[in-house]
Image (spheres, rainbow, N blue to C red):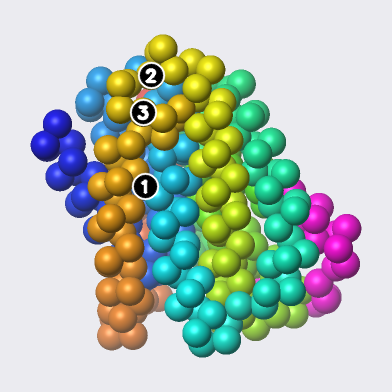
Amino acid sequence: MLLAWIIYAALGLVAGVLAGLLGVGGGIVIVPMLSIAFELQGLPSHYIQHMALGTSLGTIMFTSISSFRAHHKHGAVNWSVVRRVTLGILVGTLAGSWLAAQLSTRFLKGFFAVFLFYVATQMLLNFKPKASRHLPGMAGMSGVGGVIGVVSSLVGIGGGTLSVPFMVWCNMTMHNAVGTSAAIGFPIAVAGAAGYLINGLKVSADLPSMSLGFLYIPALVGIAATSILTAPLGASIAHKLPVAKLKRAFAVLLYVMGARMVWTLF
């Protein structure tokens, strides 16, 4: 068990640095690595992906707080947008976690692999949508929040890979879009973690002893504790290294992780 704690702490260190360095959500790294770690530990194979997703969202609850507080200090969070999108986010994320509980680990792995390929391609091409419209009203923002919430819940992320391009497309500066996305990540993580916890309790007899629903507590604590410490370090390093080249290298790594997930489906 001690070895498992060390692995989770190390995973948190890596995820925190990459999140700060490359501007990607920690979930993109945490979910596939947790999936591998859970397989090696011999956790129930039919719930491995559910536990990886739920645990990832649980860790994002903690990391998103430090992230959006830092952005808020720099005046980069548009709280009006956060308020308008939160209702849709909560409904969509809860619906997504319920849907995930009905789906097989095989389907969830395949869906996550496709999402990895999308993120990797976006990073490789350095795609940034042109600002061509303004943010919609309350109803439109709730609808967008619902979509972001469902997808984020199904892939265990804070939603930045979806919300940032949308806000930039709606004429928000990249600086404010990233800061606002960090704040949006908190309700996604809270609702998602709660949803995976509640839906996991229905099958708790089939889950490991140290799990709370689909949240695996040793992994959650180990990752959250260390990733909070290293995310600021990654952001600091970003100013000293060729981030564009690092993003391309990381995109290749995402392709490899996605390909491995697809391979395990057959």
Residue type indicated by callout 3: Ser
The stretch in magenta equals 126-146
Q: Residue at x 86, y 63 (%)?
A: 138
x then y, percent, for residue 94: 65, 39
User: Is residue 134 shown in magenta?
Assistant: yes
x then y, percent, for residue 241: 29, 81
Note whether 170 is above or below 14 in the view shown.
below
Left or right: 167 with respect to 221? right
Residue located beneath label 2 in the image: 207
Contact? badges 2 and 3 (CB < 8 Å): yes
Q: Which mark is residue 30?
A: 1
Cα separation, mark 1 vs mark 2, equals 20 Å
Q: Which mark is residue 211?
A: 3
Cα separation, mark 3 vs mark 1, equals 17 Å
Q: Nearer the viewer, mark 1 or mark 2?
A: 2
Density class for disc 3 (Cα within 10 Å; few <14, some 14-19, many ≥20) is some
Note whether 81 is above or below 54 in the view shown.
below
Q: Which mark is residue 53?
A: none
x then y, percent, for residue 147: 72, 48
Density class for disc 1 (Cα within 10 Å; few <14, some 14-19, many ≥20) is many
**First along the sequence among labels 3 and 1:** 1
Tell me if I can see residue 262 in this picture: no
**First along the sequence among labels 1 and 2:** 1
Residue type indicated by callout 1: Ile
Give the structural element (helix, strand or loop) at label 1. Answer: helix
Give the residue furthest to the left.
2
Density class for disc 2 (Cα within 10 Å; few <14, some 14-19, many ≥20) is many
Left or right: 217 with respect to 198? left
**Placement of the C terminus among the 4 image quadrants:** top left
x then y, percent, for residue 24: 45, 62
> Toward which corner of the image does residue 260 lie, by quadrant?
top left
